[in-house]
Image (tube, grey):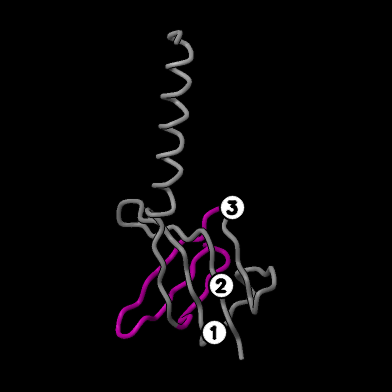
Amino acid sequence: MTERKLFLRGLLVLMFLVGLAVPILAEEAQGRIATVNPEKNQVVLTESLKNWTFLLSKDGRVLLNDQESRLSELRPGDNATVTFTRQGEQLRASSVRAVRK
């Protein structure tokens, strides 16, 4: 096998392994929305006795009752699941899925 083929095969394996690791890095938090600040792209979730403050990523998605939505449409008391990653002390939300009854 030529060096180029070996390199491409190794690169393909590396890309596959990185692709497997990315979903593992994301975490989820569930609770009720305490506050929403659309100007700061911020949502605070209450989970048991703990408040979590999330910053919605620029490409983050917001769903309300399974419909595309905006952060400004969420209300305190909505049940929500936030998918996020940690960047230092900051929690970056990639999606906020809320349910209002």
Residue 20 on image: x %, y %: 42, 46
Labelled pair 1, 3 in contact (Cβ < 8 Å)? no
Q: What residue type is labelled 3?
A: Asp
Looking at the magenta stretch, what is its main secondary structure?
Answer: strand
Within 10 angstroms of label 1, few (less than 14), some, or many (20 or more) residues? Answer: many
Residue at 43% x, 77% y: name it: 30
Residue at the disc numbered 2: 97
- Residue found at the very far top of the displayed protein: 2
Tell me the CA gap for discs 1 and 2. 10 Å
Residue at the disc numbered 1: 78
Looking at the image, tell me whether mark 1 or mark 2 is earlier in sequence order.
Answer: 1
Part of the protein shown in magenta: 32-59
Q: Nearer the viewer, residue 90 or 13?
A: 13
Residue 101 on image: x %, y %: 61, 91
Q: Find numbered disc 1 in the image and state the secondary structure of the residue it sits on.
A: loop
Q: Find numbered disc 2 in the image and state the secondary structure of the residue it sits on.
A: strand
Looking at the image, tell me whether mark 2 or mark 3 is earlier in sequence order.
Answer: 3
Above or below 9: residue 101: below
Q: Which amino acid does label 2 sit on?
A: Arg
